[in-house]
Image (cartoon, helix red, strand yellow):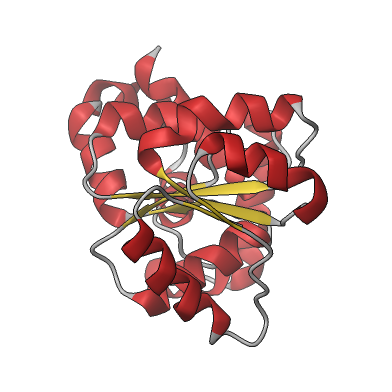
């Protein structure tokens, strides 16, 4: 489902989505009110929405019983609002200046339960909260840190294994260890916990 106030943007995006064989656009909405009405019937897996309105929309959508995912498209990014959105249940923040192919990749990742966090967002968060990173990552071993950075950067287990020169099985085991340590069950929850810690 597409939720964006700018008609031109929304229409071109709808056209792009229509070209993807495995996607079905179930609704196009101009504002949060329209979207809330459509949610019941449409029940999309992913709501693609304008970053500017996630705050007005997400809690109400959850209250209305929506169980799916949110991917926000932002014109520009700032660390604090991004961290806030991610800790409030947005699965990803996508930059409007990025390519359509990457957007499709982001939608697929988010639909499958992963988080999509643009590298620039990660960089911003790391720059903005360096003390938090050291504080939180201090207690982790070098390999756990490397795996965590890979996860935050949106890499797959195989890509992370390549980046740090280890096997995919080792990456999986390390991830499991991180899940146990932090008490989470999925990669996206792990990402959220790391980002959520950024403004406490």
Residue 21, compared with residue 197, is above or below; it is below
Residue 194 appears in the rendering: no
Which residue appears at 29% of the width and 26% of the height?
80
**Quadrant location of the C terminus in the rendered image:** top left
x and y percentages locating residue 118 in the rendered image = 34, 55
What is the quadrant of the N terminus in the image? bottom right
Q: Residue at x 23, y 35 (%)?
A: 78
Count of numbered badges drawn on the protein:
0
* In front of the other: 143 or 78: 78
**How far from the left and from the top, in percent, is residue 148?**
47, 47
Question: Residue 122 at what x, y percent from top left?
Answer: 31, 45
Nearest the viewer among 18 and 169 is: 18
Q: Is residue 33 left or right of residue 105?
A: right
Q: Is residue 118 visible?
A: yes
Q: Quadrant of residue 125?
A: top left
State the residue in front, 152 or 11.
Answer: 11
- Residue drawn at (23%, 63%) of the image: 97
| Residue 52 figure quarter | top left
**From the viewer's perspective, is 125 left or right of 186?**
left
Question: Hey, which residue is sitting farthest left in the picture?
Answer: 127
Looking at this view, name the residue that lies furthest to the top. 200
Q: Position of residue 12 (x, y in %)?
A: 38, 73
């Amino acid at each position: 489902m597409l939720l964006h106030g700018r008609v031109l943007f929304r229409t071109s995006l709808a056209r792009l989505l229509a070209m993807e064989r495995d996607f079905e656009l179930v609704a196009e909405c101009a504002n949060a009110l329209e979207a809330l009405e459509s949610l019941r019937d449409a029940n999309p897996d992913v709501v693609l929405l304008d970053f500017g309105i996630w705050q007005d929309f997400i809690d109400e959508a959850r209250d209305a019983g929506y169980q799916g995912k949110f991917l926000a498209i932002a014109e520009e990014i700032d660390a604090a609002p991004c961290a806030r959105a991610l800790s409030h249940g947005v699965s990803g923040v996508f930059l409007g200046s990025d390519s359509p192919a990457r957007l499709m990749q982001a939608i697929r990742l988010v639909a499958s339960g992963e988080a999509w966090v643009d590298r620039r967002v990660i960089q911003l968060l790391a720059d903005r909260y360096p003390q938090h990173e050291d504080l939180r990552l201090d207690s982790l071993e070098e390999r756990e840190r490397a795996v965590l950075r890979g996860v935050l950067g949106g890499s797959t287990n195989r890509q992370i294994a390549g980046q740090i020169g280890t096997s995919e099985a080792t990456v999986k085991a390390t991830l499991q260890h991180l899940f146990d340590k932090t008490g989470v069950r999925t990669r996206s929850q792990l990402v959220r916990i790391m980002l959520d810690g950024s403004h406490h």
